[in-house]
Image: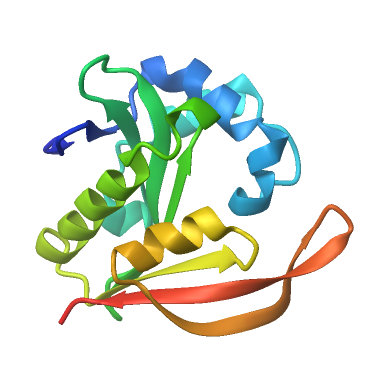
Amino acid sequence: MVTLQGKQIYLRALEPTDLEFLYGLENDENLWEVSNTTSPFSKYILTQYLENSHKDIYEAKQLRLVICILETKLPIGCIDLYDFEPKHSRAGVGIIISSEENKQKGFASEALQLLCNYAFTQLNLHQLYAGITEENIASIHLFEGLNFIKTGTKKDWIFSKGIFKNELQYQLINE
């Protein structure tokens, strides 16, 4: 896969050396709400996932890319295409920046823009979509800042920490 590069960050495929980074990311309970995770991942399971991450998006129906800072080459998060549906020419988008110190620096915006360009030019997708809980203001601003349009609300869609939350639906149509 061609490395996708911006001004501050680049996106790359998962590597076996990402095990510790992925282990920390996937087992951070603060992130479980957005990833729909309910239990920890073992290093064994994540090693198997990494061994199979070479599968083509058409086979796996998903693509996870690591967000790395250009200057340091250090991984700071992941961005995913999921529920890839070639027949309907669409995919879901998920993104996470792993630490507070790397948020609000434009990294997520640049990563999302690179992924959108890749999805529309290389995969020829017609649309991308994202589900965001309504109190996740940072993600709402991120997606709206890249012209995703709110198209609906799923009432009481996410159950987290003892309460139901509404999930907002966003779409970006490649016109």
Answer whether residue 98 is visible to the viewer in this image: yes
Which residue is at the far bottom? 152
The image position of residue 26, as x and y in percent, is: 59, 33
Q: Quadrant of the N terminus?
A: top left
Front residue (pair 41, 155): 155
Q: Residue at x 16, y 65 (%)?
A: 120
Q: Residue at x 60, y 82 (%)?
A: 153
Colouring style:
rainbow
Total tally of numbered discs in the picture: 0
Q: Residue at x 30, y 27 (%)?
A: 68
The image position of residue 162, as x and y in percent, is: 89, 57
Horizontally, residue 97 falls left or right of residue 15, namely: right
Q: Is residue 157 above or below residue 132?
A: below
Horizontally, residue 153 falls left or right of residue 125, namely: right
Using the rendered view, name the quadrant where residue 122 is placed: bottom left
Q: Quadrant of the C terminus?
A: bottom left
The image position of residue 77, as x and y in percent, is: 42, 34
Horizontally, residue 22 falls left or right of residue 117, namely: right
Using the rendered view, name the quadrant where residue 84 is placed: bottom left
Q: Is residue 149 above or below residue 59?
A: below
